[in-house]
Image: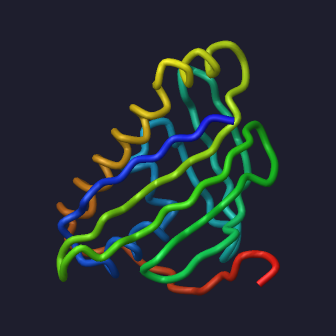
Amino acid sequence: MSTVTESVDVNVPIGTVYNQWTQFEDFPQFMDGVESITQIGDRRTHWVTKVAGQTREFDAEITEQHPDERVAWKSTGGDTRHAGVVTFHRLADAETRVTIQLDWEPEGIAEKVGSAVGVDSHQVKADAKRFKEFIENRGTATGSWRGDVDRPGI
């Protein structure tokens, strides 16, 4: 399992940043390699990605979500195994730190080599920077979902 952690400070209030992050279908606008995301329900999404010429599809489930605090997920089927959490930290009225932690299982020689030399870390860092630019340039979220999802067993 490979783990990547990246943080970015965004000059937008925490509510706006969180609201935008819940708009999964907008991810292709700032995440390189994400072709599409389809919201299947409040807790489920279907992803199509294309990285290094390889297309993958998988479903993901929100495992925990608390407005202005965190969104956690795990893949539930398809071509890739991963899980992650994004946390939101209020730094000031109009400044938010977004921290992304992604755990994933590289498959095949290209992914294993890429992970070993830090390609995945660079990708997450670049995506975080593009998210910052996206939300700062807009100043408002494209939508929001502020439902609460308790982690399993709670």
Residue at position x 55%, y 20% in the image: 116
Which residue is at 63% across, 66% downward? 39
Q: Residue drawn at (33%, 71%), measured in percent from left and top?
A: 17
Residue 148 placement (x, y as % from top left): 60, 86
Looking at the picture, how far across and down is residue 86, in whole percent?
A: 49, 62
**Which quarter of the figure is the C terminus placed in?**
bottom right
Q: Is residue 43 depicted above or below 67 in this figure?
A: above
- Quarter of the figure that contains the N terminus: top right
Query: Where is 82 relative to 70, above or below?
Result: above
Rendering quarter of residue 45: bottom right
Residue depicted at x 68% and y 13%: 109
Q: Is residue 108 above or below residue 123?
A: above
Q: Residue 124 sits in which quadrant?
A: top left
Residue 74 point in image, percent of width and height: 70, 56
Is the residue 132 above or below the residue 108 in the image?
A: below
- Residue 111 x %, y %: 62, 21
Q: Nearer the viewer, residue 13 or 154?
A: 154
Would residue 48 be found to the left or right of residue 61 on screen?
left
Instruction: Give the side of residue 123 with respect to residue 2, left or right.
Output: left
- Please count the marks in the image: 0
Q: How is the image coloured?
A: rainbow
